[in-house]
Amino acid sequence: MKRILWIVLCAAALVLSSGPKLNAAGNLASRPTDIELTVDRNLKPSQTDYTLETGKYYRWTVKNDAPGEEMQIWAVDLWRNSYLEHISFGDNEVFPFGVYTIEIDEDQEVKIFFVPMRPGDYEWSIKGQEARGLKGKFVVR
């Protein structure tokens, strides 16, 4: 029995020592890279596609400059495959467990802080405005 336990422990040590290093040097959630989306008065997005890296910290600032428009931004698959650190709006912050949509009133902005964890192509959109071009994609590598 002791011999089997010794073999199992040696095998586990070998696997752990030869596998990829999962420890990061420093704080992953510091000094975010800024990316932005501004929806103008004519409901045109400033940018539609973003290329991101796994393990890198981002601050996505979404601004609603469309008068009289409330917007709901969707990026469910991206947020499910990211560490969503927090969301700030005005002087308020939310530390969410999971997010499906974020509503942004006219002349407001929201900042979404996240670290993508899995590579993939993830769509984002403004609910109900996709036909007007308010949609795009995050390519995470």
Image: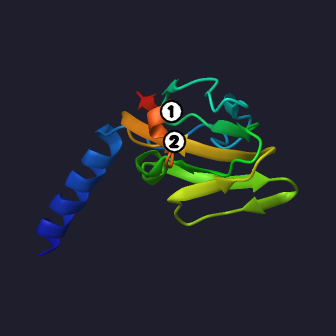
Q: In this view of the protein, which residue sits in the foreground, 48 or 115?
A: 48
Residue 80 in view: yes
For residue 21, say whether it is visible. Answer: no
Residue at 50% of width from left, 59% of height from top?
A: 100
Mark 2 near mark 1, Cβ–Cβ under 8 Å? yes
Please tell me whether residue 68 is drawn above or below residue 40 in the rendered image.
below
What residue occupies the far bottom of the structure in this picture? Answer: 1
Quadrant placement of the N terminus: bottom left
Quarter-of-image position of residue 29: top right
Looking at the rendered structure, the kind of residue marked 1 is: Arg
Residue where numbered disc 1 is placed: 132
Residue 40, percent across and down?
71, 30
Residue linked to disc 2: 129
Say which quarter of the image contains residue 26: top right
- Callout 2: 10 Å neighbours few (<14), some, many (20+)? some
- Any mark on residue 69, and which? none
Residue at 51 percent of width and 37 percent of height: 55
Residue drawn where x is 40% and y is 38% of the image: 122
Q: How many marks?
A: 2
Q: How is the image coloured?
A: rainbow
What is the secondary structure assignment of the residue under circle 2?
Answer: loop
- Above/below status of 120 relative to 14: above
27 relative position to 116: left or right: right
Report the front residue among 43 and 60. Answer: 43
**Residue 115 x %, y %:** 56, 42
Q: Residue at x 88, y 57 (%)?
A: 91
Work out how far the residue at label 2 is from the one at label 1, CA to CA, in angstroms.
5 Å
Q: Quadrant of the C terminus?
A: top left
Under mark 2, the amino acid is: Gln
Q: Residue 12 in the image: state x and y as whole percent.
A: 25, 55
